[in-house]
Image: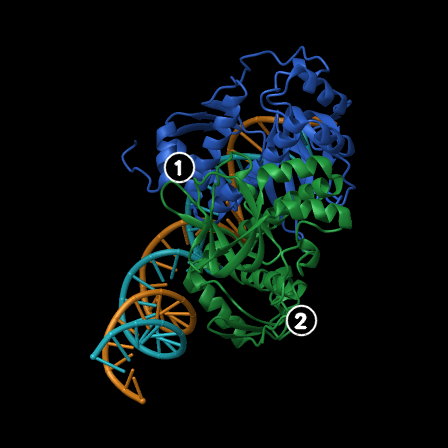
Chain colours: A blue, B green, C cyan, D orange
Amino acid sequence: MNAPNFSLSRLKVACANCNLRELCLPVGLSLAELEKVEELVATRRKVRRGDALFRAGDRFDALYAVRLGFLKSTVTSSDGREQVTGFHMAGELVGLDGIGTETHSCDTVALEDTEVCVIPYQRLEEVAAAVPVLRHHFHKVMSREIVREHGVMLLLGSMHAEERLAAFLLNLSQRFEARGYSRTEFVLRMTRAEIGSFLGLKLETVSRVLSRFAQEGLIEVNQKHVRILKTEGLRAIVAGQPCPGGQ
Amino acid sequence: MNAPNFSLSRLKVACANCNLRELCLPVGLSLAELEKVEELVATRRKVRRGDALFRAGDRFDALYAVRLGFLKSTVTSSDGREQVTGFHMAGELVGLDGIGTETHSCDTVALEDTEVCVIPYQRLEEVAAAVPVLRHHFHKVMSREIVREHGVMLLLGSMHAEERLAAFLLNLSQRFEARGYSRTEFVLRMTRAEIGSFLGLKLETVSRVLSRFAQEGLIEVNQKHVRILKTEGLRAIVAGQPCPGGQ
DNA sequence: CGTTTCGTTGAAGAGTGTCAAGGCCAGTGG
DNA sequence: CCACTGGCCTTGACACTCTTCAACGAAACG
């Protein structure tokens, strides 16, 4: 259950040896370029479950590459409403929200014990000036984040509860697979309330829809443990109408 | 009604003379740096109302700075659902979605006759390597786009119809003001259906809520013409509970 | 082992969506 | 100048999804 296909236990400090290289900042860099990037990533930081990597209002001075663990980002409106804007797993870059104003605009909190590589932004700018491939890749990362959020807007703006949940599960599934974990069986690191916040639903609705999916034989749910039985069935739900008689 | 405080009629080709300088790419550049940026912006492009600046699937090779006019961006899911992801006005940069995959992922369509400055991306990368201020500013623009979308997610995920509309009107108001137009009186360039798509509502709901606002004396609406009477009242609605007895 | 957090499920109600009809306005052609 | 047309907007009645409120059960934690 949820075991990585490769071992995460024996990682060196260098990006060159990092199993996440293909997902993280240094994608497609030469060895010489890699060395420059490694100078960037001087420090690591551990974040305990429940603790914040940074909070809205904090001064921005670094980006973070997730090495291990799981985080959520949330924005809070002036009247206290909270919205989860994303969940982050190994290989993803967080903190991009801070560049614009030099102050973070969201909270990013660990949902399980987490370790990140700290990338001081000043130095990233310097290295970006000198290494075209890295600069371009960094731009790509930001652009993809924008595109990802377009997808979330589509989900929030024009999908029903079942469609949202199905899309959410498929998205998680795909991301776990890309990291060498099972595509069909995984543990949700977030609560129903957090899923609901992300999807614009109440926690009761999330619970109910998951139960309904289970009843229809699309998935198995046991608390935070999820097994996907009919990927195509979920896809059909995302695509449009539920297929009443199974898939 | 809606007249700019400054004239837009007599613009030179150079960014240095552009009235949108303070809103656009070359914010805070020295004259020498400005010249480098001006080399970037070789061409202009006009887009007729209803025509696309680019469409999803188009090859990405340039960003566009809006000089004049009004556009919308939309994403479309595989099953044909369409979601407006944003409206763009003078001084704003569009096309950032294309960097990540070198293919545009959304349609961007002119809602009125529009003119943009074409910024070839290859050249932007080159200039960004040489001009730290520009590079940093470009990163800021992308970051702010990410933050803006967080705000939209908050709106779509946790606000009621009235709150969404109120936030939408205030946002437009503020953007018009920043461009020297009236803060309280403006023309909506988009249809009710487009507003609804952006806000995750049906056009009938948009229409009803606007009528309700008008009835409560918060705004005046006449087709596409809007006048804001009680900014604070709208703010109160966004903030939380409607204030039943006026503001 | 008690306490707390989290999850499930039911019943009732509110907020939007859906469907339908009609009005307003700009553009077109007689 | 007027009638016609099509797109856009408004409004009403009704249906339906999702939320709200509430109670209970299960797992996690000290």
Q: Is residue A201 left or right of residue B132?
A: left
Name the spot of residue C17 as percent of width and height, x first.
Answer: 39, 56
For mark 1, give the secondary structure.
helix
Q: Can residue A22 be seen in this view?
A: yes
- The alpha-carbon separation of the residues under discs 1 and 2 comes to 58 Å
Residue at image point 64% right, 25% down = A69
Same chain shared by disc 1 and disc 2? no
The answer to whether B21 is drawn above or below residue D5 in the figure is: above
- For label 1, the residue is A212
Front residue of A68 and B160: A68
Name the spot of residue A2 as percent of width and height, x first.
Answer: 53, 18
Q: In this view, does A69 lie to the left or right of A184?
A: right
For mark 2, give the secondary structure.
loop
Name the spot of residue A116 as percent of width and height, x first.
Answer: 70, 26
Q: Residue B5 carries which label?
A: 2
Tell me which chain the residue with mark 2 is part of: B
Tell me which chain the residue with mark 1 is part of: A
Residue count near mark 1 (Cα–Cα under 10 Å), binned few <14, some 14–19, many ≥20: some
Name the spot of residue B104 as percent of width and height, x first.
Answer: 48, 41
Amino acid of disc 1: Arg
Front residue of A84 and A178: A178
Residue at image point 63% right, 20% down = A29
Residue at image point 70% right, 33% down = A50
- In which quarter of the view is residue A97 placed? top right
Quarter of the picture containing the N terminus of chain B is bottom right
Front residue of D27 and A217: A217
Q: In this view, does A180 lie to the left or right of B12?
A: left
Amino acid of disc 2: Asn
Q: Are marks 1 and 2 in contact (CB under 8 Å)?
A: no
Q: Residue B172 carries which label?
A: none
